Image (cartoon, rainbow, N blue to C red):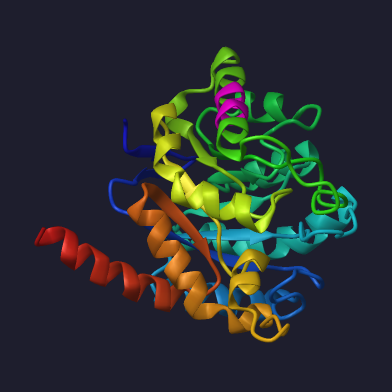
């Protein structure tokens, strides 16, 4: 497998795991909604994530938690553009978490490096935007149904086979349009229309997805499946209380072949990966 992720301005070496730090500029994200909704606090948060060791910043202007309301493109852009104008000047890889072609085009015009799409470019016009861009990186994620209903009607069948076939089809679709495979990273979509058991089956067998010959991104940070296994006497810990479990899941994902982990708790994840890399270096 080629271990370079080609993006707009950077060729990212993913032969060692990279930490993607989450910057939500939304009022309603499941974990930290509203904490960084204004430009000043979002930029301060982004700077802190970089100081803690984030290799990529992933900026989102619309929550995709289960049941979240759809945000119009103009409102999403109003949230994103002020922070992105500054972040692209920092000379670090910038990803934008969006599925709307209009938003993709606008942020790529600003110079962002990666489109991180929960719909895997299935929205009308999304493939064309990415195909017409000469270099931007893309993360293609598996999602069952849509955020408004995905946890009401979760997946049937063998989750591993379904996810593998979906990601394979999306890869092939983009390559038919001339998009170089070096630009594409795959995400099995933890928590997006899957049961707790299905999410952990994906983690246990994640390495089998490497036969698609593209790097994998894993997004376990503070997810409800972690809350489910941490629950005690019917009490499920709040998202911010799932820090240790999130780090453990990220480390397990890397052990099973993930090249990028998308996290809220950057410092703790970076520290855990340093220990893992020390062991790898002495194996």
> Which quarter of the figure has residue 127?
top right
State left or right for residue 196 relative to residue 212: right
Say which of 57 and 264 sits in front.
Answer: 264
Q: Residue at (83%, 46%) from the top-left corner?
A: 153
- The extreme left residue here reads 282
> Which quarter of the figure has residue 55?
bottom left
Q: Which residues are magenta?
A: 164-170
Q: Is residue 165 magenta?
A: yes
Q: Residue at (33%, 75%) from the top-left corner?
A: 271
Q: Is residue 34 magenta?
A: no
State left or right for residue 214 relative to residue 280: right
Q: Residue at (59%, 26%) from the top-left corner?
A: 165
- The extreme top residue here reads 176
State left or right for residue 169 relative to residue 249: right
Q: Residue at (18%, 59%) from the top-left corner?
A: 280
| Residue 203 percent across, percent down from the top left | 49, 52
Secondary structure mostly seen in the magenta stretch = helix
Q: In which quadrant of the rendered image does the C terminus lie?
A: bottom left
Question: How many numbered marks are there?
Answer: 0
| Residue 80 percent across, percent down from the top left | 73, 59
| Residue 72 percent across, percent down from the top left | 90, 51
Say which of 82 and 28 sits in front.
Answer: 28
Say which of 159 and 244 sits in front.
Answer: 159
- Seen in the picture, residue 1 relative to 93 is either above or below; the reply is above
């Amino acid at each position: 497998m080629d271990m370079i992720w080609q993006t707009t301005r950077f060729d990212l070496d993913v032969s060692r795991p990279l930490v993607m730090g989450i910057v939500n500029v939304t009022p309603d994200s499941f974990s930290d909604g509203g904490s960084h909704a204004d430009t000043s606090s979002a930029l301060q948060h982004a700077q802190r994530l970089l100081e803690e060791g984030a290799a990529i910043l992933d900026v989102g202007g619309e929550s995709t938690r289960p049941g979240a309301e759809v945000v119009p493109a103009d409102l999403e852009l109003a949230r994103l553009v002020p922070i992105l104008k500054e972040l692209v000047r920092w000379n670090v890889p910038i990803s934008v978490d969006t599925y709307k072609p209009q938003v993709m085009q606008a942020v790529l015009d600003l110079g962002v490096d990666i489109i991180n799409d929960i719909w895997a470019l299935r929205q009308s016009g999304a493939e064309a935007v990415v195909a017409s861009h000469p270099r931007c990186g893309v993360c293609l994620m598996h999602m069952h149904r849509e955020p408004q209903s995905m946890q009401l009607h979760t997946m049937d069948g063998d989750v591993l086979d379904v996810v593998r076939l979906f990601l394979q089809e999306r890869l092939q679709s983009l390559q038919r349009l001339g998009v170089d495979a070096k630009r594409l990273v795959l995400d099995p979509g933890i928590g997006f229309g899957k049961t707790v058991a299905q999410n952990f089956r994906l983690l246990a067998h994640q390495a089998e997805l490497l036969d698609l010959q593209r790097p994998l991104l894993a997004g376990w940070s503070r997810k409800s499946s972690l809350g489910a296994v941490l629950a005690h006497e019917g009490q499920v810990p709040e998202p911010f209380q799932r820090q240790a479990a999130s780090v453990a899941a990220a480390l397990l994902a890397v052990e099973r072949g993930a090249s990028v982990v998308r996290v809220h708790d950057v410092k703790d994840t970076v520290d855990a990966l340093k220990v893992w890399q020390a062991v790898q270096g002495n194996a």
